[in-house]
Image (cartoon, rainbow, N blue to C red):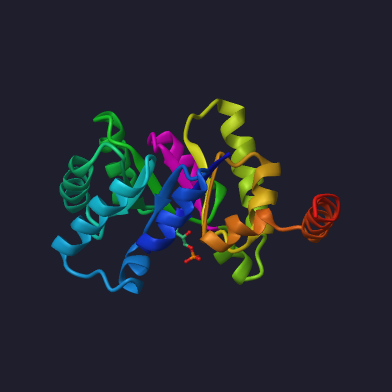
Amino acid sequence: MKFFIDTANLDQIADAQDLGVLDGVTTNPSLMAKEGITGAENIINHYKKICEIVDGDVSAEVISTDFNGMVEEGEKLAALNSQIVVKVPMIKDGIKAIKYFSDKGIKTNCTLVFSAGQALLAAKAGATYVSPFIGRLDDISTDGLNLIAEIRLIYDNYGFETEILAASVRHTMHILECAKLGADVMTGPLSSIEGLLKHPLTDIGLAKFLADYKKGNS
Ligand code: E4P
């Protein structure tokens, strides 16, 4: 399973990269705004900085909602760095744009996916990644994890190569459940990744080992 971090915060991206388990980054316009990154030039520079920190794929979202606009923006973004994945919303023109990018060998991430039907369409268009937002489904009392299971089944039935990128991951258990269901990738906050480290018996065991070592070597 690939681990992506879902942030535009450079310190958190660097922290995750230092941990040695990071495979990529996802951003979106809200995450950019949260870091105070505004204006086309600053946004482009920020993507360049992210690409310098990480080795893997970096999703950069288009703002246009029409085919021509998405193509123009996406081509500019893709030209920044081979790590860039053009993030395209799940709308009609978005599907057309994904097909266009896919035919040109430009990587895509189909975002804002909330149903298995949408995921099927994204795969048919040749998306590199499909992003079902599990946390936002949970927020409205719908089973986000069940969507991962449905998409896994459909993709496996037909051998689609589109990778299932479980997005809107909010906590550590989401990561574990997505791993059990066979999601190819998860993207979440640094805290959700660090949560995987924690177990009280590890802390108790380590304290005992160190105390025993001290006894025998003092
Ligand atoms: C996906 O790529 C999005 O950036 C993200 O996962 C959305 O998460 P949220 O629902 O926590 O905003």
Residue 141 % position (x, y): 66, 69
* Relative depth, front residue between 202 and 74: 202
Q: Split into 4 quadrants, where in the image is the N terminus?
A: top right
Residue drawn 49% across the image and 37% down it: 163
State whether residue 33 is above or below residue 208: below
Which one is in front, 27 or 209?
209
Q: Is residue 125 magenta?
A: yes
Place of residue 53 in the rendered image (x, y in percent of width and height, measured from the top left): 34, 49
Residue drawn at 64 percent across, 39 percent down: 182
Residue 8 shows in the view: no
Residue at (51, 55) in percent of width and height: 167
Viewer-proximal residue among 13 and 97: 13
Residue 119 as seen in the image, left or right of residue 62: right
Question: Can I make out residue 217 in this image?
Answer: yes
Q: Quadrant of residue 192?
A: bottom right
Q: Tell me where residue 65 sits by quadrant.
A: bottom left
In the image, 24: left or right of 115?
A: left
Magenta-highlighted residues = 118-133
Seen at 48% across and 29% down, the residue is 161
Q: Is residue 109 magenta?
A: no
Q: Residue 204, percent across and down?
A: 82, 60
Q: Position of residue 36 (x, y in %)?
A: 28, 74
